Amino acid sequence: MGRDEGILLRAIEIADTGATKEISDQLSALPPNAVVSLAFPDEAISQARLVKSKGNLVGLVAPETSIEKLLFEVVKDDGLEEGRLVELQIGERNVTYQIVNGVTKEEIVQQKNTHGFARAQAQKIGEWDAASKRFMFVKWLPAPNAPVFLKGTANFQPTRDAIGHFPGTDYPVSIKSIDDLVTHNTAVLGILGIGKSMLAIELVERMMAAGIKVVCLDLTNQYSSELACYINEAKESAATVALQGIGESGKNKVRQNVEDGGSRTAFAEAIGVRMREFMKPENSSRLMIFNPTHFEVWRQDSKIFSGNASMASLSPAEITQIISQATLDSVAALGMTDKARVCLVYEEAHSLVPEWNSSVADGDRSASNGSAR
């Protein structure tokens, strides 16, 4: 690559391709610094991957590329965008990267002339293994100035087992183990409207299909709407009304012993009964949905004085902690297992299990710690 008299020239070597005697004779007859265009290259050249895929060539590996991070200078930006996949060779392996960023840069060539260009950044994903339908780890980095190709497919084929696909390709995003998804904490993060809830609901359906029970705590009522076909609406409505009655009855329940006042204890016991029934292996039901804002549960905050005491209603975070604890207790009673039994889903988790430094009330901090445990 060089710049002289206003011309920017890039040359890429076609690796492992030797010139035939005929071409060698033609090249040897050329004057120094000449350029020749081969109208009819030999078969070895025409079948080389670089030549066959030159329509998808988008860049060349740039300096400061590391084992995990690819930087490449863009030579053609058709189809390039954040999230798209690119591919290059590391040794004999075709390695895939995903574009995560891009910047414009300028460099000085031939002492005083400047040249502006775009540089893209991509994160290594690995080498695609068609047999296992997953990416395999590659432990090295590409050679400088190696060609970078855009990955894509004209005929997209969705896969039933996939929960998503890499943009512009048939590479599926799959779940390695549905049990690990439950027994290890999983967070679905993203900006507003990007599809977090739809992905979570898809995962919930797959868990239920695998025999895992699911308890959803949802402030939005979206789960009740999207998963309505999995619940007995009449039965769940009656159970909710019963819990609401228990909670509301504690507003005027003042006791000498503060812990006995209000309805928190009775509400927790009722939740525990429901959860133990739900978790019985013979119970075919696999989904329960709670909206913590639907329950008015009271606790006594002070000693009794003249027949009265200070009463406070529990926040959604405190009710979340009660349901979480009841779920843990019911599962613990069933003993150890290698398989996931139940998944707790917190929709709008920042409200149900808020960070301790964003909680105004002391009760929310304590409740969040309890749910976290």
Image (tube, rainbow, N blue to C red):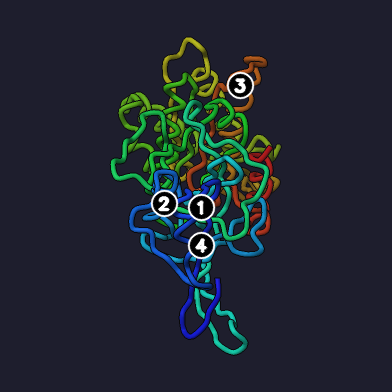
Amino acid, disc 3: Val
N-terminal of the two: label 3 or label 2?
2
Task: Give how far apart the Cα atoms at labels 3 and 4 are.
Answer: 80 Å
Residue at disc 3, secondary structure? helix
Q: Is residue 244 above or below residue 312?
A: above
Give the alpha-carbon distance from disc 1 to disc 3, as whole Å: 62 Å
Amino acid type of the residue that numbered disc 4 sits on in the rendered structure? Ser
How far apart are the alpha carbons under marks 2 and 1? 8 Å
Mark nearer the N terminus (1 vs 3): 1
Single out the mark in the foreground, 3 or 4: 4
* Residue tagged 2: 51
User: Disc 1 designates what residue?
Assistant: 14
Q: Are marks 2 and 1 in contact (CB under 8 Å)?
A: yes
Residue in view at x 43 percent, y 48 percent: 45
| Closer to us: 361 or 104 | 104
Please give the residue where the numbered disc 4 appears in the rendered image.
28
Mark 1 falls on what kind of element? loop
- Residue at disc 2, secondary structure: helix
